[in-house]
Amino acid sequence: MTALEVVLLVVAIVAGVLLVVLLVARYVVRAMRRKGAATLEAEFGEGEVQRSDPLANYFGLESRGVKQMRGNGTLVLTRNQLWFRRIGGNEALEIPLGAVVDADIASSHLGKRVGRPLLRVRFETTAGPDVVAWYVGDAEGWVGAIQQAKQLLR
């Protein structure tokens, strides 16, 4: 086998592996979207959801520290709350909009970053203040929607 044949073989193998990875990733993303849509349908009534992201990447609650796991799930804004459930999880994080102190953009949360803007929400709990963050497709849009929903509560 010549050097050129070896190079072509390696390139073909790498291209094949990349193709398989892309196909698997595409399948996984579609499955996550379907799961998110099913969650929305099961948890919320028609017209209740103001904004949603079935692939929101959860960066954790500040009160639980840096060792918690990130994970994708469904993030929902209704007129009364911000709601999140991780894919495969049973427990939902429910933040009443009246408890939200601020929503803004962050570049990292708990030492984790993705190189894109994160939606960061500061809120009050019975145990004191807390902060949570997600990577969502349109973080700025989420900030505006949360601020607008908060104003409508007044």
Image: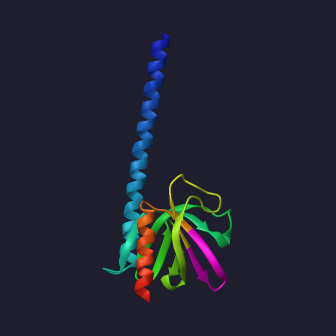
- 32 or 63: which is nearer to us? 63
Q: Is residue 114 above or below residue 14?
A: below
Please state the horizontal and vertical placement of residue 68, each as a whole percent of the image. Answer: 64, 64
In terms of image quadrants, where is residue 139? bottom left
Residue at 49% x, 82% y is: 97
Residue at 44% x, 37% y is: 18
Query: Does residue 89 appear anywhere in the picture?
Result: no
Residue at 49% x, 17% y is: 6
Position of 112 with respect to 5 (left or right) is right
Residue farthest toward the top in the current orientation of the protein:
2
In the rendered image, residue 12 lying in the magenta stretch gets the answer: no
**Image: magenta residue range:** 122-132
In terms of image quadrants, where is residue 54? bottom left
Position of 58 with respect to 27 (left or right) is right
Residue at 43% x, 31% y is: 15
In the rendered image, residue 126 lying in the magenta stretch gets the answer: yes
Please state the horizontal and vertical placement of residue 145, each as a whole percent of the image. Answer: 41, 73
Q: Quadrant of the C terminus?
A: bottom left
Query: Does residue 76 appear anywhere in the picture?
Result: yes
Q: Is the magenta stretch mostly helix, strand or loop?
A: strand
Q: Is residue 135 above or below residue 24?
A: below
In terms of image quadrants, where is residue 128? bottom right
Q: In this view, does 79 lie above or below 109?
A: below
Give the color scheme: rainbow, by chain, secondary structure or one colour: rainbow
Please state the horizontal and vertical placement of residue 28, each as a whole percent of the image. Answer: 43, 53
